[in-house]
Amino acid sequence: MLRNCALTVLILTSAALAQQTGAVGDWPDWRGPDRNGFSREKGLPEKWSLDGQGLAWKAAYGGRSTPVVLGDHLYLENTAGGRETEQERLLCLNADTGKLLWEYRFNLYQSDVPAHRVGWASPVADPETGNVYTFGVNNLLTALTKDGKKLWERSITEEFVPFTTHGGRTVSPMIDGGLVVVSTPTSTWGTQANRAQRFIALDKRTGDIVWISTPGGRPYDTSYGPMNIVTVNGTRLLVAGGSDGAALAMKPQTGEPVWNLVLAKRGLNTGIVLNGKYAIASHGDENLDSNEMGMIVSFDASRKGKLGADAIKWSVKGFMGGFSSPVIDGDRVYQADNSGNLYAFDVETGRQLWKQTLGTVQKASSVFGDGKIYIGSESGRFYVLRPHADRCEVLSDVELPLSDTGIVSQKIPEPVVAAAAVARSRVYFVSSDTLYAIGPKKTAAHEWRPVAQTMEPGQGDPAWVQVEPTELVLKPGDTVQLHARLFDAAGRFLREENAAAWSLDHLQGTATNGKFVVASENVGQAGLIKATVGALTGEARARVIPPLPWNETFDSYAVGALPPQWVSAQAGMFQVTELDGQKVLEKKPTDTLFKRMRVFMGPSDWSNYTVQADIRIPEKRRQMGDAGIIAQRYTLYAFGNNQRLELNSWQPEVARAVSAPFTLKPDTWYRLKLRVENTADGKTRIRGKAWAVAGAEPDAWLIDRVDPIPNKQGSPGLFADAQFGVYFDNVKVTPNP
């Protein structure tokens, strides 16, 4: 009886404080309506088989991310095409029949993610508007209507230069009120030039950036820990695992950091769930105080600031919970370890209650609903389990068909690496090859109906000033209206403040009553627009990009400086220096991961232009670096060691690369030229050439390509991969003739 009461209290508390996103029967977030892997539905399936028993439908769409369901629409993110024509895509299917309704494809560009890791993040559906949001592995955030019409997009890649790796790890977006939130390690400019995991909240209707938060430290790597909203002592918190190895919390409507507890020496990839005031988190990497790997831990989430060991209630070291997120069922917490074992722990003490073997490798998270656990394994099996206090009962164990998407010689059952979704009396899950819907053939579930999230109004004195929009890309002479919004100590909205005092920091122009008018001079700028209310000050950041043409010789900059509006130049260790009596831009020597960097110089919506720059690559220990220029999401590389030019938009996919031999002598100036033009027939033509600065420009282009899946816009930029440094000079960007 006590356990049933605890479960009832947990559900009621979740309903009252978390404000379930959507109606019962929806699964709008990959971790469910409360983002914790818990479903309130009843009458869910106990058994099914591939021959049709309990199988509502299946469709030949595989993937690695969890589907989401809103009304009768199911959304799945995966890939389309292959090699030269591979794209990421969002599929929309009828949740009742499996019929494809529409698909939306988008390109991969300026990313180091390999083809087999594309489609990592799950989409998120908004119960209020019916819109759906997708965050690609190249950090392109796109908002679509439920009918597949694009509303807006933000190229986080070009605006924030995320840390892109071969792992492909991508945090799935989250909806909270009027915001859509994404997260990724970035390095931009000014006070955010350092590499750190940042949480970026955007207005879900317009795409304007509302807040940016940096609650953690320097990242060890990329991570994909899901975001959750919990309420502790009346304060709503956005909690997530960070790429710095910490469990993080911030106020979801403002981004104000609340606490940070470092747990591991690598990034955290699992979700955080709440038991009363205690948060439960896990990892599968090295612990801070020992060489023992892995831990599940419960700690006090009501504290503030930098938390230490005294905040920990209990921990189980040696538990390798690195991928699969936990789920709470009353007085028990369930979680699978990396080796395919499902554990039950006492939620109050951490005492292990039982262990159930599922396979040998595990990535997918558990989902709990109607007294059952639904979970797939990378070994190609899907389980329906009934947990008990002292054991786990296997209700259904189905081995999936042999996969057609992996290495042919392996012929293994279809791996499942994504969690299931529970909606409309069914359980939906995706394998490497197939999307399955198990449960009744017909459902009485409703179509989508708007469900607005209720936010508790603020009380008392202001404690936070938010200037919105908070990240701007402008041009000389632009005018933008900003708003000073006040929040209380719990992060709840109070009001918009019309009497704020406005000021500018490192920006030329005027700011009056929130209206910022950029000075008309054609110079690059980067600075702050501040709003002060009493003792509180909030700020927005703005870059001002002068119109084309450009001809940057760096003569106007002091040694050690750089164009302030260029994104990631500071983190990439670029600076103006003197070489042979002239000022040039140097990419400083480094043997860290920052030796390979992209710098973006303009807006992400430019098109039909030419980039030209002089490059000089030194040689040391018989090694030369690489340098390149970027135009409209295409890069022209000059490879020093390989002595060739290469054109590509997504370098890991070599099938779309075009190359030409080219001799590069050490410590010699060469000129690169890249022209991209959108043609009248809807295609994009990309041409590149290079020559010694001491010689004449050749008439012929060395590389000439028409892209079958064209990038129609993008920022100009620079590329460098140089352990021993590289130099740039005479950077020109001009409209095409």
Image (cartoon, rainbow, N blue to C red):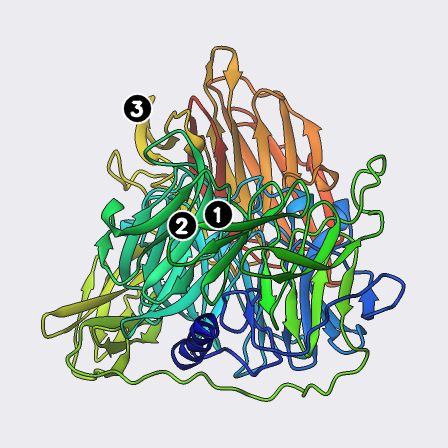
Mark sitting earlier along the chain (1/3): 1
Q: CA distance from mark 2 to mark 1?
A: 7 Å
Identify the residue under disc 3: 581
**Most foreground residue, 736 or 431:** 431
Which of the two discs, 1 and 3, sits closer to the camera? 1
Residue 78: horizontal and vertical position, in percent?
A: 69, 57
Q: CA distance from mark 2 to mark 3?
A: 46 Å
Q: Residue furthest left?
A: 535
Placement of 77 over or under 511, stated as above or below: above
Identify the residue under disc 2: 242
Question: With 470 as the anchor, is 321 left or right in this view?
Answer: right
Residue 541: horizontal and vertical position, in percent?
A: 30, 61
Mark sitting earlier along the chain (2/1): 1
Q: Which of the numbered marks, if any, corresponds to residue 223? A: 1
Which of the two discs, 2 and 3, sits closer to the camera? 2
- Cβ atoms at labels 2 and 1 below 8 Å apart: yes
Placement of 463 over or under 653, stated as above or below: below
